[in-house]
Amino acid sequence: MGPDDGFDGKGFSAEQLRYSWKDARILSFIFAGACLACVGMAFYVFANVPWDTRMPYDGRYNRAGTGIPMQIAMLPVLVPILGFWRAVRRPEKEPRTKAGRVRVYVIAVFAAGVCILAQWTMAEAILVAGGAVS
C-alpha cells in the first residue's frame, strides 16, 4: 500500500488519511478471515467426503442427472470473497464521513457473513450427499 497503488492522499486531512489506511487494513482482515473460514470448510469437506461425490441436481440443464462435482461446488463462494478482499485492500480515493465509514463496516461484515453462510450451507449439503453426515 502506498504510492504504487495510485493513492496519493490528495484532498485528505492527516486524520482522514490515517482513518483511510486503518479502514483498508481492518476491512482486509475481515475478508481475509472470511476467506480462511471458507477455505477451512472446503478442506474439511475434501478430507471427509469421497472425491467422486457429486451434488444431486435434476434441473433443466443436466438431463443425465449426474450433478456437479463437489470440488466445483465449493469454489463459487471464494470468488466473491477474493473480489471483496481485493477491492478493500486500497484506501478510498475520496474522504468519507463517519457515517460512511460505519456503513462500509456494516456492509463488509454482512457480505462476509453471507459468504461464510453460503459456504457452510454448501459444505453441509456436500457432507450429506457424501454420507459423512446424516
Image (cartoon, rainbow, N blue to C red):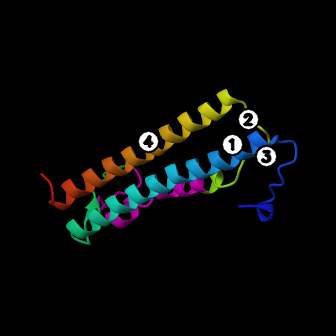
Q: Which residue is identified by label 4?
A: 114
Across and down, in percent, residue 83 comes to 59, 55
Viewer-closest of 49 and 83 = 83
Q: Which residue is identified by label 1?
A: 19
Viewer-closest of 117 and 68 = 117
Question: Which element is circle 4 on?
Answer: helix
Of discs 3 and 1, which sits in the foreground? 1
Q: Is residue 77 visible?
A: no
**Inter-mark Cα distance, 4 to 3:** 27 Å
**Inter-mark Cα distance, 3 to 1:** 12 Å
Q: Which circle's residue, 2 or 1, is located before the other in the chain?
A: 1
Q: Which circle's residue, 3 or 1, is located before the other in the chain?
A: 1
Instruction: Examine the rendered structure and indicate whether residue 25 appears above or below residue 16.
Output: below
Of discs 4 and 3, which sits in the foreground? 3
Instruction: Examine the rendered structure and indicate whether residue 81 appears above or below residue 110.
Output: below
Residue 33 falls in which quadrant of the image? bottom left
Q: Is residue 3 visible?
A: yes
Around disc 4, counting alpha carbons within 10 Å, would you say few (fewer than 14), some (14 to 19), or many (20 or more)?
some
Q: Residue at x 68, y 42 (%)?
A: 19
Around disc 1, counting alpha carbons within 10 Å, would you say few (fewer than 14), some (14 to 19), or many (20 or more)?
some
Kindly identify the amino acid type of the residue bearing the numbered disc 1.
Answer: Tyr
Q: Which residues are magenta?
A: 60-85
Kindly identify the amino acid type of the residue bearing the numbered disc 2.
Answer: Arg
Question: Which element is circle 2 on?
Answer: loop
Across and down, in percent, residue 59 comes to 35, 49
Around disc 2, counting alpha carbons within 10 Å, would you say few (fewer than 14), some (14 to 19), or many (20 or more)?
some
Would residue 75 be counted in the magenta stretch? yes
Q: Which circle's residue, 4 or 3, is located before the other in the chain?
A: 3
Q: Residue at x 54, y 41 (%)?
A: 108
Across and down, in percent, residue 4 comes to 79, 65
Q: Which residue is identified by label 2?
A: 96
Task: Evaluate if marks 3 and 1 touch, with contact meaning CB atoms under 8 Å apart.
Answer: no
